[in-house]
Image (tube, helix red, strand yellow):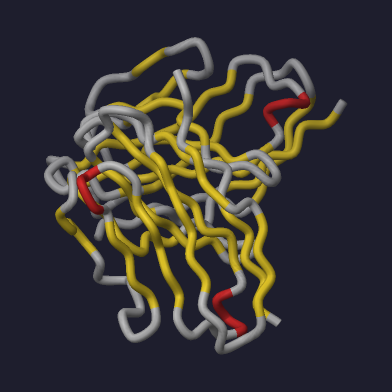
Amino acid sequence: DAKTTQPNSMESNEEEPVHLPCNHSTISGTDYIHWYRQLPSQGPEYVIHGLTSNVNNRMASLAIAEDRKSSTLILHRATLRDAAVYYCILRDGRTYKYIFGTGTRLKVLA
Amino acid sequence: EAGVAQSPRYKIIEKRQSVAFWCNPISGHATLYWYQQILGQGPKLLIQFQNNGVVDDSQLPKDRFSAERLKGVDSTLKIQPAKLEDSAVYLCASSFAGKTEAFFGQGTRLTVV
């Protein structure tokens, strides 16, 4: 199973942009890059996903490197409610299996 | 749209007892996942179903854990007998044939004493 590497923790000031990096050097051609976040005492929540092109939705943007070996989740204006653990996951495009890593704990400072 | 339902929310049992968790996925979702999340760690995939067939159970400790998804709808995960190290949150998730994002339930927090 392809693995991802993320920093253990990051901090951001409220209302500033946040860039959460993820390395996935062993990604295969059929793997989709997914991001989920987990608030305390809740199940993970879908944020965004992509294959090759950059993606935007109402929650965030996903920037994917041209070689697909890394990606960055961008929160345009962090709020206190964005404090969570963010997981970068490679979802196997054939088996649809999600393998979580340890994630990045994002702390947002007021 | 109703989300993924799990029960119970909390369970405390003694070691060597048995326990069962129930999951009702979102209607129409063919893919169902069970994850184990130990405190401070990311979720670990235990088993993945496609309808009522098992796609992957390579990380399921089959000597004590079992799971079934009869009729391809709801699912149960059982532990028998439980060990102290089974204390964790058990998460159920579902997706539409695995092709879209997965939706997670709130989980069942198991404490084994």
- Position of residue A53 relative to residue A101, above or below, is above
Pick whichever, A47 or B23, lies toward us: B23
- Specify whether A45 is left or right of A109: left
- Specify whether A97 is left or right of B109: left
Pick whichever, B9 or A20, lies toward us: B9
- Position of residue A75 relative to residue B84, above or below, is above
Residue situated furthest top in the rendering: A58
Pick whichever, A28 or A42, lies toward us: A42
Residue situated furthest bottom in the rendering: B16
What residue appears at the point 16 percent right and 48 percent down from the top-left corner?
Answer: A95
What residue appears at the point 61 percent right and 86 percent down from the top-left corner?
Answer: B15
Task: State which quadrant residue A19 falls in.
Answer: top right
What residue appears at the point 59 percent right and 47 percent down from the top-left corner?
Answer: A104
What residue appears at the point 42 percent right and 53 percent down from the top-left corner?
Answer: A100
- Specify whether B8 is left or right of B2: right
Residue A105: x and y in percent read 65, 46
Residue B27: x and y in percent read 32, 28
Residue B60: x and y in percent read 33, 72
Residue B20: x and y in percent read 48, 65
- Position of residue B90 relative to residue A57, above or below, is below
